[in-house]
Image (tube, rainbow, N blue to C red):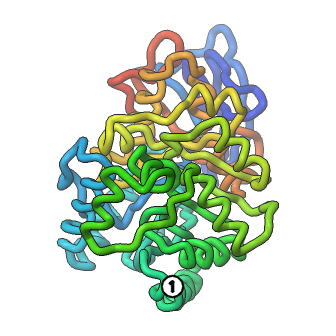
Amino acid sequence: MRLTAEYVYTSGASGVIKNGYVEFDEADGTIVSVGECSADEQITPGALTPGFVNGHCHIELSHLHRKFRKGTGMAGFIDQINELRDWAGRDEKVRLTRYWMDKMWADGVSAMADISNDDSSFDVKKSHDMYTRTFLEVFGSEPHMCEGVMEEVTALNATADQAGIDAAPTPHSCYTMSPELLSASAAAGLAKGFLSYHSQESQEEEDLLRTGSGAMYENRRRSGMSTPPVTGESSLKYFIQRLASAVPAPYSQHILLVHNVCLTQDDIDAAKKVMDNVYWTVCPLSNIFIHNALPPIPLMRSNGLDIMLGTDSLSSNDDLDMVKEMFCIHQNFPEVPMSEILEWATLNGARFLKKDDVIGSLEVGKKPGIVRINNIDENGCVTAASSSERIR
């Protein structure tokens, strides 16, 4: 079958083709040919892209859709999570997980790096067309919790293995974990070859580590929870220190740092020094939802970082729409070419997941899924009216 579009974003070597086509095998979706249309060929409006890779999601929190107040900051957001996350029973969580995964699939998401705290999403994931790598996230602020938490996540990992789901333990963040648990869970993830970590999501997180002050510090103390040591350094540097205490550097595993709102040049240098395969997910609409902030995209680009694009969860986003995330980036950083934003949303995620031999780009022999983005502007950029639909 042959599809045409005003713009074809291959996310491969050719980047973008104006007035292009994609041919694929209708039986299994394998790309047969990609190129420029002939002068007399009818061109369909819009853009064609490979299937998207959602670089960070918490699909099991879909029952929290539109239940959170916006602009509360991270400490206020955590309070809402603690208050609301258990309102729904398992059957309702499973139903909404399936609904939103089906919606993402129809919108063009072919793969996802997802966070799980329990097994409520496993039945949906194991039978779904979307590929997911699941990060089994752990929490525990008190040192004495470490052994019990690790036993629980090991059992959860065994359940995922039995379901045929690619999964690994992973730490949540610096502010929800004792130093011991952070190191132990990171070591377990590294042993499986993949690690995800909420990194530098807010200034509150940085204040907690640098000076032992701020809203998050006060929130933890009021709750009677231990806080991480005050280091005078960034939370990312603290994470690197905890990694080193468990497993000596350098790290060849695929490490995903998520959010990166407070990222600095010093942090980038520190991560690159010890991490050979580090990827950096941005979730712009979630960051705006919680604390009206955005990551330093110009700094990240100037350092040549492997950026990925994610939605985060429906507790901190009104949708799980990758095109809306692209538009947010385009609107706030118009200097970033649309072809580059789409690479963040496709090929870079596929590379992180080690699935780029199959998905992530419109290249002959691959089966990435094919997506049409409608209502683009005359330069091939997404607009506020843009939407996506899976063609194959």
Label 1 sits on what residue type?
Cys
Say which residue label 1 marks: 146
Measured as percent of width and height from the top left, residue 352 is found at 67, 53
Where, by quadrant of the figure, is residue 65 drawn?
Answer: bottom left
Measured as percent of width and height from the top left, residue 207 is found at 43, 49
Observer-nearest residue: 271 or 62? 271
Observer-nearest residue: 350 or 366? 350
Q: In this view, does 184 lie above or below 354?
A: below
Measured as percent of width and height from the top left, residue 271 is found at 70, 49
Q: Residue at x 50, y 17 (%)?
A: 334
Q: Residue at x 44, y 20 (%)?
A: 376
Measured as percent of width and height from the top left, residue 105 is found at 44, 52
Quarter in which the N terminus is drawn: top right
Q: In this view, does 360 lie above or below 8?
A: below
Where, by quadrant of the figure, is residue 216 drawn?
Answer: bottom left
Decide if residue 165 is in sight here: no
Q: Residue at x 49, y 36 (%)?
A: 295
SS class, disc 1: helix
Crowd class of label 1 (few under 14; some 14 to 19; many from 20; radius 10 Å) = many
Q: In this view, does 203 lie above or below 341?
A: below
Q: Which residue is drawn at 18% across and 48% down?
A: 69
Decide if residue 335 is in sight here: yes
How many tags in the picture? Answer: 1
Q: Is residue 271 above or below residue 219?
A: above
Relative to 186, 174 lies left or right: left
